[in-house]
Image: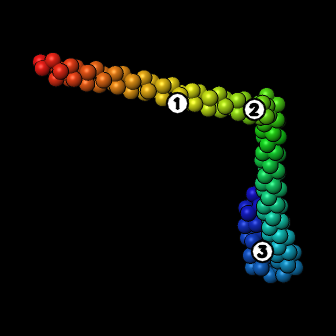
Amino acid sequence: DIQREEEKVKRSIKDAAKKGQKDVCVILAKELIRSRKAVSKLYASKAHMNSVLMGMKNQLAVLRVAGSLQKSTEVMKAMQNLVKIPEIQATMRELSKEMMKAGIIEEMLEDTFESLEDQEEMEEEAEMEIDKILFEITAG
């Protein structure tokens, strides 16, 4: 709309110049300059408004992040209250002790079974020796 009016004013200036109306040309030229300045101010205002809008969107995003962080902190506090770290550590220590005992007991059982197997082997070997000696003594 403003640009159409600007074109009309330019035509009016040309018409006034053809007619030799210098005063009218000056007044219309000043009006044209004011119109251009107004358009420039409008564009500057629009840019400023866009800048303010972007700033507000940025602040909104920061507020959302802050809210999320606050909720995360609350969740972490709730988890901390639910999970008692010292109790878990004590339980883990007890479990570790029991596992150590079980490991030691397991080793002892393995040693006992190995010694039993050794005794069985020894008895078998002893019987074989006895059989061998008896065979030699009785000469078959």
Describe residue 140's horizontal placement relative to residue 25 as left or right.
Answer: left
Q: Residues within 10 Å of mark 1 (few under 14, many from 20)?
A: few
Kind of residue sitting beneath label 3: Ile
Which circle, 3 or 1, is nearer the viewer?
1
Determine whether, in the image, residue 4 is placed left or right of residue 115: right
Secondary structure state at the residue bearing disc 2 = helix
> Height in image: 1 above or below 138?
below
Q: Earlier in the sequence, mark 3 or mark 1?
A: 3
Report which quarter residue 9 is drawn in.
bottom right
Q: Residue at x 67, y 31 (%)?
A: 97
Quadrant location, the N terminus: bottom right
**In this view of the protein, can residue 103 be seen by the observer?**
yes
Label of residue 107 in the image: 1
x, y percentage for residue 39?
80, 65
Residue 40 is drawn in which quadrant?
bottom right
Residue 18, position in %: x, y? Answer: 75, 79
Question: Does 101 appear above or below 38?
Answer: above
Classify mark 1: helix, strand or loop.
helix
Residue indicated by mark 3? 13
- Between 117 and 110, the one nearer to me in the picture: 117
Q: CA distance from mark 3 to mark 2?
A: 95 Å
Q: Which residue is mark 2?
A: 90
Residue 35 appears in view: no
Q: Nearer the viewer, residue 70 or 83?
A: 83
Q: Secondary structure at mark 3?
A: helix
Dot placed on the residue nearer the N-terminal end, 2 or 1? 2
Q: Residues within 10 Å of mark 2 (few under 14, many from 20)?
A: few
The three-letter amino acid code for the residue at tag 2 is Ala
In the image, residue 40 sits, relative to residue 69, either above or below, namely: below
In the rendered structure, which disc, 3 or 2, sits on the residue that comes first in sequence?
3
Dividing the picture into quadrants, the one containing residue 72 is top right
